[in-house]
Image (cartoon, coloured by chain):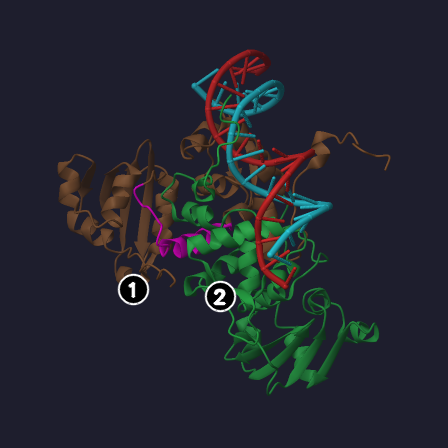
Chain colours: A brown, B green, C cyan, D red
Amino acid sequence: MKLRKITVKPESRRHRWYEDACGAAHALDLIGERWALLVMRELMWGPKRFSDIKAGLPGISANILTQRLEGLEAAGVLVRRKLPPPAAAQVYELTAWGYESEPIFQALGRWAARSPAHDPTLPFSAASLLLSLRTMLDPLRAKGIDARIGFRLGVETFTAHLADGHIEIARGALDNVDAIFTGAPPVLAAAIYGGQSLESLEQADALRVEGDRALALRFMALFPLPSKAEPPG
Amino acid sequence: MKLRKITVKPESRRHRWYEDACGAAHALDLIGERWALLVMRELMWGPKRFSDIKAGLPGISANILTQRLEGLEAAGVLVRRKLPPPAAAQVYELTAWGYESEPIFQALGRWAARSPAHDPTLPFSAASLLLSLRTMLDPLRAKGIDARIGFRLGVETFTAHLADGHIEIARGALDNVDAIFTGAPPVLAAAIYGGQSLESLEQADALRVEGDRALALRFMALFPLPSKAEPPG
DNA sequence: CTGTATCCGTGTTGATACTG
DNA sequence: CAGTATCAACACGGATACAG
């Protein structure tokens, strides 16, 4: 054998692909690398800057985030845009097709919610908490409620609009809301999913509710978790 | 350095977790490693042996498959069982919770079907082709058809039961079917998704149809692919 | 302050060869 | 058939250093 070590250009070594026509395999070729899906999750509520993405992803390092953003841009999942002055910041934004990935998060989230090993006390980003609300809403319980709920999660604010057993969520200024939750995402998660009482969280000064308190309490009960899967054996 | 090679116990071999309470992140902790989901895909139609799993996964190496099977077993996604004599073979089988992962494949497959980069000419395993049928069935087109279709894909046989705009698929002997397709999975894929005419594939001796030919032709048209996503810019 | 590029230690992955 | 052992290549993450 002559060609012992061809000097392969680093860029030509692209990637490891599954050689498989299966749609799921192709999806994993595009977004199956470590962190890729979580980067997309952080962008599900609108464009973000590099460091805001990074802030929602505890443990990712800057170079890895750069690589993922490049890869996702090449795949057509997101684009990088320059905001017009005066903001003049660079942001990353999902393409229309990128936003269509939401059912993937829902399927993963619903399935993982039944995992015996799921630990809900870990850090929770605002993006993922809101995604989980859309995933876990019980349409039957929400039937008949028409209301707007605001969230102040750290520096970000969101408005959820409940109507017809359906929930719409948008990032942005809180206008015309009937109730507002203010607190860190894990605290709100403890209230909605962890069965923590609103009073105890308020007394610990971890969560605050303004506006229609009865509505807020009703809202917190709209997101039942599924039962855990049986461990085998 | 004294401790050149500490004999680390294999179980202490933690892998890298996302420290994130998000359900999707936890799902990726469990099944996000390379090959893990595709191993599950191969088991979606029932228990399989090591080498049959491997055969459906072009490119996986034996040691990686071993590791994934161990990991998935530890996660509670599958169990290993010893078949009773005379078969007496070891097989891997999804747990009930493991089977519940099908929506993940559907979400991934549906999303990837709109990828501009999807190449349907790559190898296609029987398991993934049948999974794609369940994903892509158009209930409206299937309305009013009540029929049983058999598939001989290599050594495996499957029966699909169409009723009420819904499809059920099971591996096993072909009993009481109205039509049978015989051929390699990529060929059947070309017929159903690639727009290849049945006649041309039969003339090339790549596909054979027995039984109700009109039904077979109707069946082939029940699985429309979505349009491709626009490349950005 | 925001993002990118580079080095480096470590752990993961994968091809090949080998064993029960 | 069902894996294990070995080794090389690579990906990850941390820590910088650097550029606008």
Residue at the disc numbered 1: A140
Residue at the disc numbered 2: B81
**Could you tell me which residue is drawn at 17 percent across and 45 percent down?**
A198
Report the side of A191 relative to A167 (left or right).
left
Q: Do the residues bearing badges 1 and 2 touch, measured as CB atoms within 8 Å?
A: no
- Across and down, in percent, residue B149 comes to 62, 80
Report the side of A21 relative to B135 (left or right).
right
Q: Which chain is mark 1 on?
A: A
For residue A108: magenta?
Answer: yes
Q: Which residues are magenta?
A: A100-121
- Across and down, in percent, residue A199 comes to 13, 43
**Could you tell me which residue is drawn at 59 percent across and 34 percent down?**
A70
Numbered marks: total: 2
Which quadrant, please, contains the C terminus of chain B? Answer: top right
Instruction: Name the residue type under label 2.
Output: Arg
Quadrant of the image occupied by residue A123? top left
Q: Nearer the viewer, residue B148 or A44?
A: B148
